Amino acid sequence: MRMRLGKTWTGAAAAFCLSGFMATEAEAIESCVASLKQQAISAGVRPEIAERMLSGAAYDEKVIRFSTAQPEFKTEIWDYMAFLVDAERIRDGKALLKKHARTLAAVEQRYGVDRHVVLAVWGIESDYGNFRGDFYTPHALANLVCAGQRRQKYFRGELIRTLQIASRGDVAVNDFKGSWAGAFGQTQFMPSTYNSLAVDFDGDGRKDLVNSIPDALASTANFLKNAGWRDSRLWGFEVKVPKGYSGPSGRKKYASMATWTKRGLTNVDGSPFRSRQETALIRPAGVNGPAFLVTRNFQALRSYNASTSYGLAIALLSELVSGGEAFKTPWPTNNPGLSRAQRLELQKLLNRNGFDVGEPDGKVGPLTRAGIRKAEAKYGMPVTGRPSWNVYYALGGR
């Protein structure tokens, strides 16, 4: 149910109606959650587990907004990469590569997935376990079932599976902290994915993706193997495309390396190809940005989150933590994105310059975007709300 508040309504009237709307939603949630408890018990969940995990579930405007809102603007790939593959994540990844060397080697041997790629998924999904999400996932899922506007049947199934996982004792009741959509753990598995692909790698009898790093890393490798990753293949590599190229491109349009050579492509340094694998050409930032030939392993990366930018973030982080090099071709922009440290500093600069964005935390939400828009307007920039270098520099960032 939605309500539009017309411009002629007074603030008091709008607030009154909104409070009435929230009260109605609260009542509906309460009734729905009671029904969900019974459904869970019928599906084999222990009654005390269903009660503990669903009691207190209330209408969560943020969950519903996240599930229905369209992005305010298209996130450019250079913003995405600057945030996800920054100096801090690379540094931490190298340290953890050494710390968990034995576990990562054992995972690689068992599942045939490059240890650096497994580590990169861990880094991208939860910052190596440091941030797993803001939501108690059973309550988030209950909201999606009871107040969501799409895929209620799917989310009901995910909720029941969540409660069953806890009922079996694999993951503790209080450990289901994750995304608004129900993913949890160090590498963010949905409950259905957990049931089919999670593994007990530390041998304690539990598939604990929250507190067991071996279980989380091995489960991720198992996921990628199941998605088609083969260690005999690279994920891909950066290439040089001739000017005026008008041939095929697209992540599913595979061809032999001999065919790509005939089309005029070379390694990014201009040297001929040595690989004999079938690859597909992707140009995620258009004809003026970096280009890559990717194997079917890239499809496995992309299956973790259906996004080319996401797949490239994992690929680049895996290269950098293993001592490889960054992409050679620059992104086609003179206004690049900001790292996490720079985003945090941007919030401090916005506050210092009178654009109140609340307590700085490095997370760019609606309040920060509003502050950026005000700053952009003041300094005569296009008003976008985007955390970019230009606004950062204008506010005094260096």
Image: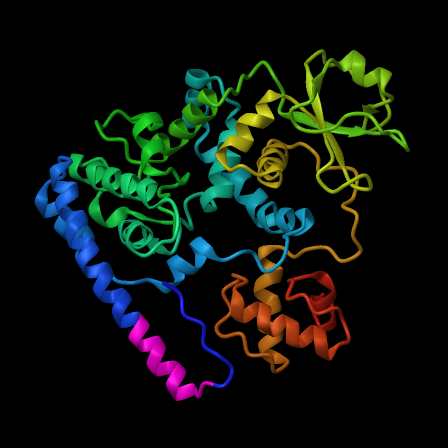
* In magenta segment, residue 335: no
What residue do we see at 14% from left, 39% from top? Answer: 45
Q: Position of residue 311 (x, y in %)?
A: 59, 35
Question: Given the current orientation, which residue lies at the most extreme right position?
Answer: 243
Q: Position of residue 76 (x, y in %)?
A: 67, 50
> Between residues 357 and 46, which one lies in front from this camera angle?
46
What residue do we see at 42% from left, 38% from top? Answer: 187
Q: Quadrant of residue 33?
A: bottom left
Residue stretch rendered in magenta on the structure: 9-21
What residue do we see at 81% from left, 39% from top? Answer: 287
From this view, report whether residue 271 is shown above or below residue 393.
above
Q: Position of residue 278 (x, y in %)?
A: 68, 15
Q: Is residue 352 visible?
A: yes
> Between residues 306 and 203, which one lies in front from this camera angle?
306
From this view, report whether residue 243 is shown above or below residue 252.
below
Q: Position of residue 262 (x, y in %)?
A: 86, 15
184 left or right of 395 in image:
left
From this view, report whether residue 293 is shown above or below residue 90.
above
